[in-house]
Amino acid sequence: MCKQNGLRSADTHTFLTMAVHKILKMGDPRLFRAVLPVAEFGTDTLRQLVSDMYDTMRAAKGAGLAAPQIGVDLQVVVFGSDAPNPRYPDRPLVPATVLINPVITPIGDGEALDWEGCLSVPGLRGRVPRWSRIRYTGYDLQGNAVERDAEGFHARVVQHECDHLAGILYPMRMRDFTQFGFTEVLFPEMDPDLDD
């Protein structure tokens, strides 16, 4: 199910595990169910889950990842990075964030239509309507409150990842399936090794 490399810390004898999990693909029924909120923060289990999610997201060159995508039924998403994403090289940076038990509130009525891909829907892209500006709240690993306003690509990534927690994949949000297709056809200039 996942690849693991263990590192033992010489001074603490703590075993740190780095794991890249298999990402579930569209059609797997586990992707279509709503998941449970996290009840306990700051646990070793939660820290390991978040670490595994970041390892998996980075290995897949994703912009974000939700726990259900690796078969974990908890309201946990990770997204963003300190470096440009190779799958979305022209997009602005999104701050690296762990968001647990998130709530999204639109700011205004504005919507934007833009292309999205998904690690659980490999090789395909579609134009998806999303709120242009949002406020998202939730918690970090330790249970500290997170509250942030976002717009543009940042808002899109947050909405996309949080949809996974309700069992929603981006094609379910689309209104025009003439704007849905294989990435290699829609974006022939894109390096196929960088997509999904």
Image (tube, helix red, strand yellow):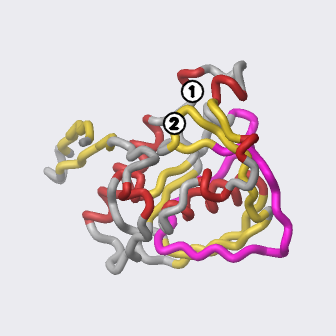
- Name the residue beneath numbered marker 1: 194
Q: In the picture shown, does residue 109 fall above or below 119?
A: below
Choose between 111 and 64: the one closer to the eye: 111
Where disc 2 sits, the SS reads strand
The residue lying at 68 percent from left, 24 percent from top is 185
Task: Point out the image quarter for the N terminus.
Answer: top left
Residue 17 x %, y %: 24, 46
Query: Which range of residues does the magenta coloring cover?
Result: 89-116
Residue 15 x %, y %: 18, 49
The residue lying at 50 percent from left, 68 percent from top is 166
Choose between 85 and 122: the one closer to the eye: 122
**Magenta stretch: residue 108 in it?**
yes
Q: Is residue 141 visible?
A: no
Residue 90 x %, y %: 75, 35
- Name the residue beneath numbered marker 2: 122
46 vs 161, left or right, is: left
- The image quarter containing residue 154 is bottom right
